[in-house]
Amino acid sequence: MRRPRGIIFDFDGVLVDTEWAIYQSWVHLYRREGCEISIATYAPCLGAGYSHWDPAKHLEKLTGKHYDWEVETPIRQARIESDLSRMGLMPGARELMDWCCAEGVGMAVASSSSRHWVAGWLTRLGIYERFEGVFTRTDGYPVKPNPALFLAAQECLGLDKEECLIVEDSENGTISAVNAGIPCVAIPNRMTAASDFSRAAYREHSLTSLLESLRNSSH
């Protein structure tokens, strides 16, 4: 692995294990209604939000009911917040960011989630100011696998594509990186372990192993 001059992080599932909590909120709701939702069924949402597949519409199709989502969504959100309140950053995330700062490697975040969600968590975790830019779908960018979010982050860092490295955990995100023409390292988690990461330039087990690879990389 060649040492990058800038790293572009996805947020959900890369910096914080949010995807599991979000998925579990849907599992709880589906089971309340006598239904099941597998990770494989939910997978189109990973890295792309609900633009490509909507679990709410799927539940209504399964049950034949219409739900008041203005009531259901806050309940589900409260469950997510409760689960995440006990979590911090992914293992190795803070150490990797410290290394980037020490080595002069620029950092940005590019996420298909909303700015309220991403910036809120980055601020709560005390790391928002570490990033040169944070780019989300509610800033007007199309979600992944469209490359726009990553291209905006690359432009913000002021680097050529080959000088950057994207860190992703989802297949949609990896495809987005390929579409952007920027090297990508895939780090699967418990939500994305079965995904196809053959398009990624590199693959690591964790942010900790990525940091070790970067420390051993050539300039």
Image: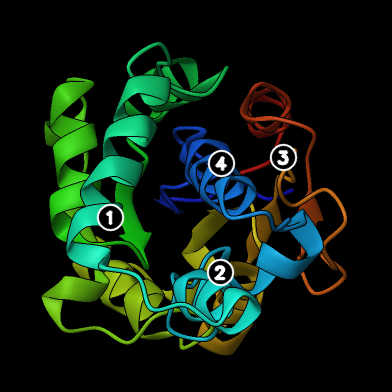
The disc, 3 or 4, on the residue closer to the chain's N-terminal end is 4
Measure how far apart labels 4 and 1 are at the Cα level. 12 Å
Q: Is residue 216 left or right of residue 54?
A: right
The disc, 2 or 3, on the residue closer to the chain's N-terminal end is 2
Secondary structure beneath label 2: helix
Tag in front: 1 or 3: 1
Residue placed most toward the observer, 79 or 111: 79
Q: For mark 2, what is the residue? A: 45
Q: For mark 1, what is the residue? A: 73
Residue 171 visible (yes or no): no
Quadrant for residue 110, please give it. bottom left
Secondary structure beneath label 4: helix
Residue 16 rendering spot, x and y as whole percentages? 45, 32
Measure how far apart labels 2 and 1 are at the Cα level. 16 Å
Residue placed most toward the observer, 20 or 137: 20
Q: Is residue 52 left or right of residue 151?
A: right
Image position of 25 with respect to 72: above or below = above
Type of residue at label 3?
Asn
Q: Residues within 10 Å of mark 1 (few under 14, many from 20)?
A: some
The disc, 2 or 4, on the residue closer to the chain's N-terminal end is 4
Q: Is residue 132 left or right of residue 8?
A: left
The disc, 1 or 3, on the residue closer to the chain's N-terminal end is 1
Q: Which mark is residue 189?
A: 3
Q: Quadrant of the C terminus?
A: top right
Secondary structure beneath label 3: loop
Type of residue at label 4?
His
Q: For mark 4, what is the residue? A: 28
Total marks drawn?
A: 4
Measure how far apart labels 2 and 3 are at the Cα level. 15 Å
Measure how far apart labels 2 and 4 are at the Cα level. 17 Å
Q: Residues within 10 Å of mark 3 (few under 14, many from 20)?
A: some
